[in-house]
Image (cartoon, rainbow, N blue to C red):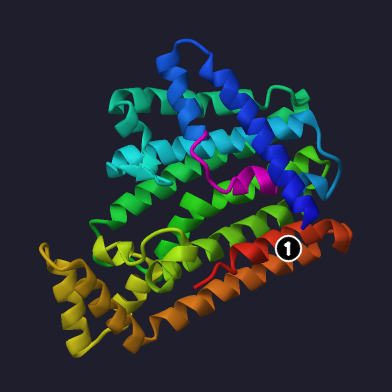
Amino acid sequence: MKRLEEIQRIVETHIEAEIEALNIREPKHLYAPIAYALGNGGKRFRPRLLLMAMEMFSQLTPQGLDAALAVEVFHNFTLLHDDIMDDADLRRGKDTVHKKFNPNTAILSGDAMMISSYNYFKGLAPDLRAKVLDIFTQTALEVCEGQQYDMDFENQSDVEVGAYIEMIRLKTAVLLAASMKIGAIIGGANEVNANLVYDFGIKVGISFQIQDDILDVYGNPETFGKEVGGDIVSNKKTILMLQAMRDAKGDELDKLNEWLSKEVFDREEKIAAITSIYDKLNVRQKAEAIQQSYFDQALESLDQISVSVERKQPLRTVAISLLRRDV
């Protein structure tokens, strides 16, 4: 685990230096919110995974560190705009950017983050930069597509599990996968290996989001990091809810629809009632089976990458740790 901790420190040091630069940049009302958003914590999964993928094929370089910063800035841009769309008050326990400053400032600073993320790739050689920017641009568009599908699902009553998987692939998994593929390409990976790295990231990202759905209902709040049951309260169409809506019959279906249609309710009562329906329909076990299948596919892709087992071990370790959060 020592190398994983070193990567974490390298990422944090690079981000902290960027935050310091942003805090003295003018106009301050544009750049201070960006510094605030970047400094608001997080696990830094994407930059860490980018550098780990790079190290499978070569050594870390300043260009790789800047690429890691690019994906982290872009990721935080998506969170900033998500919070505006959701009118969220808190992000990681602190005021969201639009609450601390104001919505117009947040929108403009978010735009600047998205644009600036491209600038971090300028140190790459022209042919390499062209490859990386093609991936990055396609990924940015796909993340927007995923967000739109997620919003569309709020008003749809007939969302299929397969459509949900595609939504989380776009909204969550593609940026994780692209981060690793970009790192691999900067590290000198050939096309076959780079694509295997990408497939590994897609499958890990999907598996991670499915587990997040499960933990939102069945997780331990102390280890999960947030209060459980939020998805149930908001009628969010998670994989658990979609499985229940598909499998419920008779009284169970009537009870489920009744709770979904209530506008006034006791929070804990609703969570307990719908969790009970989930338990009777075994939707947790079904979701866990899907989650495990994607994770197994991820490891199969990792195994096929043509580098030594030792070089692949850090990514394997991180992937396993992502999927072993306490319940």
Q: In the image, is residue 241 above or below residue 86?
A: below
| Relative height, residue 176 to residue 104 (above, below) | below
237 lies above or below 12: below
Residue 270 image offset from top left, x and y in percent:
21, 72
Q: Check the image and name the residue furthest to the front.
A: 222
Q: Quadrant of residue 16?
A: top right
Check if residue 259 falls in the magenta segment: no
Q: Let me know if residue 133 appears in the view.
A: no
- What residue is at 52 percent from the left and 33 percent from the top? 38
Left or right relative to 258: residue 234: right
The boundaries of the magenta stretch are 39-49
Extreme residue toward the top, this view: 26
Quadrant of the rendered structure where residue 106 is?
A: top left
Q: For residue 293, which quarter of the picture?
A: bottom right
- Callout 1 crowding tier (Cα within 10 Å): few <14, some 14–19, many ≥20: some
The spot of residue 317 in percent (x, y) is 72, 63
Q: Residue at x 67, y 46 (%)?
A: 48
In the picture of the structure, the residue carrying the numbered disc 1 is: 316
Which residue occupies 75% across, 29% down? 63
Image spot of residue 23 (x, y percent): 52, 19
- Judge from the rendering whether residue 240 lies leftward or rightward of residue 51; answer left or right: left
Residue drawn at (55%, 42%) of the image: 139
Q: Up-down: is 190 above or below 294?
A: above
Give, as a three-letter code, the residue at label 1.
Arg
